[in-house]
Amino acid sequence: MTKIVVVDNHGQFTHLERRALRDLGVDTELIDNDTPPEEVDADGVVLSGGPDMDRIGKSAEYLEADMPVLGICLGMQLIAEELGGTVGSGEYGGYADVSVDIVDEDDPLTGSLHPETRVWASHADEVTELPDGFELTAKSDVCDVEAMSDTDRDLYGVQWHPEVAHTEEGDEIFENFLSICESQ
């Protein structure tokens, strides 16, 4: 059975990320973000959302682990910032229902979603420049980088929260990530 760990970056929806994966029949463990990757035996990792970069613990170390990584909201921003991209304040701020355009139909994480899908996202902070090796996979009128992927390194990020009921096709994001992990 595939095992996914969810790294807790103190976000308000972290428990829902674990629950969404468990509901898909995945062996899932929620771990403290001070847990070093070498202590983790898993097939993939979700870097959860959270309030700010000052509370990410050892989360950045998972980018060098030999397993696929999915960053959600702050987790995506962490990936971008650690790998040479930039993160800035969003123009629209807090949580809102957003219409997202999928721009890469071949992407293994977002490509199977409808060309336009509704998501629940916070845009207080957002990726403003992609790191080298990443492709833009989704955008919106609110945010130029709603999702990104580096398929060579199996690093993926979404600005939105697939684990909440307000997000259409949220389960599909987790199913696709699970498929990525199982193909390793």
Image: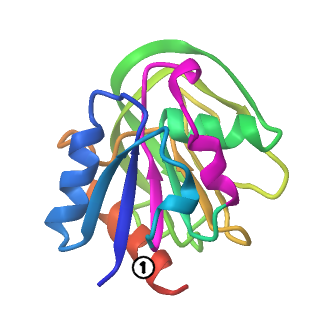
Q: Dot 1: within a 10 Å radius of its alpha carbon, few (fewer than 14), some, or many (20 or more) residues?
A: some
Point out residue 175 in the picture as x, y percentages from the top left corner.
33, 70
Per the rendered image, the range of residues in magenta is: 43-64
Toward which corner of the image does residue 10 lie, by quadrant? Answer: top left
Whether residue 130 is visible, yes or no, is no
Query: As drawn, is 165 to the left or to the right of 163?
Result: left
Name the element at disc 1. helix
Point out residue 6 in the picture as x, y percentages from the top left corner.
37, 51
Foreground of the two, 46 or 58 = 58
Whether residue 141 is visible, yes or no, is yes
61 lies above or below 65: above
Point out residue 52 in the picture as x, y percentages from the top left corner.
52, 19
Q: Is residue 53 magenta?
A: yes
55 lies above or below 132: above
Point out residue 116 in the picture as x, y percentages from the top left corner.
42, 52
103 lies above or below 41: above
Q: Residue furthest front?
A: 39
23 lies above or below 158: below
Residue in the picture at 25% in, 62% down:
21
Q: Which residue is mark 1?
A: 179
Total number of numbered labels? 1
Residue in the picture at 49% in, 76% down:
180
Residue in the picture at 49% in, 66% down:
109
